[in-house]
């Protein structure tokens, strides 16, 4: 399954209990940055995908960008820079 987001948006892999995920979601919403959230505990194969992006760790939030690159627990500033906003 391809989780690469559309231009100007991101895909966020998260869990319901992740405080860093909740904080980043609030920041993204306040900044008007669109995202698709994928709960790695609910969507088969996504925990393994996150592990592959993070050296074997299920670290969230892990973000995918339209260019196919990924970032783990980035700041809002980093997300904006990557998206060019």
Image (spheres, rainbow, N blue to C red):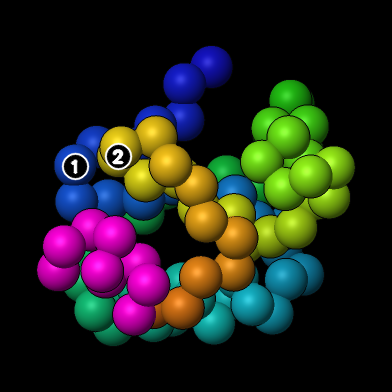
Residue at position x 53%, y 17% in the image: 1
Residue 43, percent from left and from top: 69, 33
Determine whether 61 is above or below 56 in the image: below
Give the side of residue 2 with respect to residue 14, left or right: left
Determine whether 9 is above or below 69 in the image: below
The label number, if any, that marks residue 41 in the structure image:
none
Query: Pointer 2: what residue?
Result: 66
Query: Pointer 1: what residue?
Result: 7
Q: Number of numbered discs present?
A: 2
Determine whether 13 is above or below 1 in the image: below
Q: Nearer the viewer, residue 23 or 80?
A: 80
Residue at position x 32%, y 74% in the image: 29
Gap in angstroms between the C-alphas marked 2 and 1: 5 Å
Residue 33, percent from left and from top: 25, 65
* Stretch in magenta: 77-85
**Residue 24 is at least partly visible in this image:** yes
Q: Which circle's residue, 2 or 1, is located before the other in the chain?
A: 1
Provide the secondary structure element on which disc 2 rests: loop
Going by the picture, which residue comes out furthest to the left?
Answer: 85
Residue at position x 60%, y 60% in the image: 72
Provide the secondary structure element on which disc 1 rests: loop
């Amino acid at each position: 399954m391809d989780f690469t987001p559309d231009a100007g948006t991101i895909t966020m892999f998260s869990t319901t209990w992740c405080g860093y995920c909740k904080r980043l979601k609030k920041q993204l919403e306040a900044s008007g940055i669109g995202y698709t959230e994928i709960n790695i505990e609910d969507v088969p194969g996504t925990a393994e995908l996150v592990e592959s992006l993070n050296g074997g760790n299920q670290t969230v939030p892990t973000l995918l960008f339209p260019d196919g690159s990924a970032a783990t627990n980035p700041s809002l500033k980093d997300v904006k820079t990557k998206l060019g906003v």
